[in-house]
Image: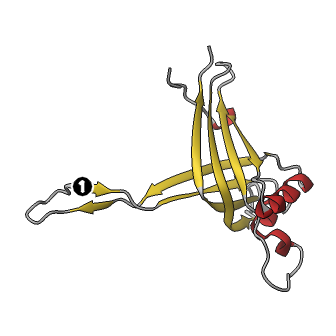
Amino acid sequence: MANTNVYRGSDGAITLSVEQNEEGAKAQGIIDENELTTVGRATNVTVEVTSDLKPFHELGQRYPTELRPGNVNITGTIDRANINGALLKLLLGEAASSRPAGTWVQPSFNIVLNLENPAVVGTSNIITIHGVKFQNWSYGIPEDDFVMEKARFMALWISVEDKVGK
């Protein structure tokens, strides 16, 4: 049976996990230090998957006769109202606290987006974004609103799992 529930942002939770490699180890240290396994104070999370489709047009035809799949890119953003440097550290790694002499490892991690309607127990939609690296980080200080940081990310691949309760 397919999951046909609708969700609101308040039904969601964001958690971070890591792969067992050098980039994951760097991310795990930052996640542990900032108690960031569950990401709090987040809003406006976006995930975009694009495929570079290429149409093939035959001579004498106005419509394409074939669409060929190309590269797939996964990007997104996270807005967060908790400015503690954790997201900036996940972008810069050890370069967030000092200027390294040479190159350094940029942390890599997974973002798990879990949507679960509390009225429908056991039914959820889980999107896992694998091999995430932050591409940029910014923050704004508005005159009369909440201070927010924003991080844009890219990822290696994405998976989806629908769980349907009984």
Q: Residue furthest left?
A: 60
Q: Amino acid at mark 1?
A: Glu
On the image, the x and y values in percent for residue 36 come to 83, 50
Q: Residue furthest top?
A: 166
As helix, strand or loop, the secondary structure at mark 1 comes to strand
On the image, the x and y values in percent for residue 157 come to 58, 53
On the image, the x and y values in percent for residue 6 come to 55, 28
108 to 14, vertically: above or below: below
Question: Where, by quadrant of the figure, is residue 15 drawn?
Answer: top right
Q: Is residue 81 left or right of residue 9?
A: right
121 to 49, vertically: above or below: above
Figure label count: 1
Whether residue 154 is visible here, answered yes or no, is yes
Of residues 26 and 140, which is closer to you in this image?
26
- The residue at the point 29 percent across, 55 percent down is 67
Q: Residue furthest right?
A: 33
118 to 144, vertically: above or below: above
Whether residue 151 is visible here, answered yes or no, is no
What residue sits right under mark 1 in the picture?
Answer: 66
Q: Is residue 121 left or right of residue 22?
A: left
- The residue at the point 64 percent across, 62 percent down is 152
- The residue at the point 88 percent across, 58 percent down is 29
- The residue at the point 78 percent across, 65 percent down is 88
Of residues 15 and 55, which is closer to you in this image?
55
Question: Where, by quadrant of the figure, is residue 99 drawn?
Answer: bottom right
Quadrant of image for the C terminus: top right
On the image, the x and y values in percent for residue 54 come to 32, 62
Colour scheme shown = secondary structure
60 to 120, vertically: above or below: below
Q: Residue furthest bottom?
A: 101
> Neighbour class for label 1 at 10 Å: few (<14), some, many (≥20)?
few
